[in-house]
Amino acid sequence: MSDSVELSTVDLRILRLLQNDARISNKDLAAEAGIAPSTCLDRVNRLRELGVIIGQRAEVDAAKLGRPLEALLFVQVRPHRRTLVDSFVEHLLALPEVRAVYHLTGPDDFLAHVATASATELQRLVLDELTARDEIARVHTNLVFQHWSGGPLLPPA
């Protein structure tokens, strides 16, 4: 059973436009989508009610916030049990350096995207906040040189 919803070509156009610029006015969005502003507002509200649109976020430059060093931390949790997993995720999400957390399959259990002020701060984060925990078996760190985002996410053709 799938959680996907049926979307019209107009809905897809609206989603594409909003993902490229979430601050676009309803009037401009309607004009770009080729529909009346009232219809556009109804469609956007419907997409929110259906859970297709789940939020709006500001994308920030970590370096301009004093965190120029970004890294991907691959973490193994042992034993891999729900109580440990839940408390570990809670711990990660409470850390100001953590930008995103992913629960994985394969040799690593988690991927954490972090941003720190320096290599010394990254080392402190790994040693004091991760490997100091009993359930952490291994942390593998990769530095991020550059990051690109993909285009708007749309359903498969």
Image (cartoon, grey):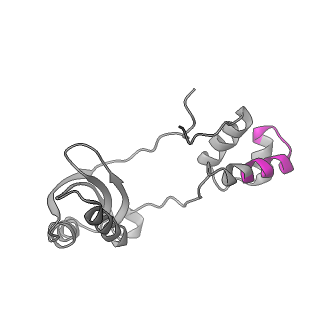
- In screen coordinates, is 142 left or right of 157? left
> Total marks drawn?
0
Tell me the quarter of the picture where residue 6 sits.
Answer: top right
Q: Is residue 68 magenta?
A: no
Percent of width and height locating residue 102: 35, 53
User: Residue 16 or 66: which is nearer the viewer?
Assistant: 16
In the rendered view of the protein, which quadrant contains the C terminus? top right
The residue under the point 54% across, 61% down is: 58
Q: Main secondary structure of the magenta part?
A: helix
The span shown in magenta is 32-45
Point out residue 117 in the picture as x, y percentages from the top left corner: 29, 68
Furthest residue in direction top, as rendered: 157
**For residue 92, above or below residue 148:** below
Residue drawn at (28%, 44%) of the image: 105
Residue 142 position in % (x across, y down): 22, 51
Residue 33 percent across, percent down from the top left:
76, 39
Q: Nearer the viewer, residue 30 or 117?
A: 30
- In this rendering, is residue 61 above or below 2? below
Is 3 or 123 nearer to us in this picture? Answer: 3
Q: Is residue 66 left or right of residue 139?
A: right
Q: Residue furthest front?
A: 1
44 falls in the magenta region:
yes
In which quadrant of the rendered view does residue 155 lie? top right
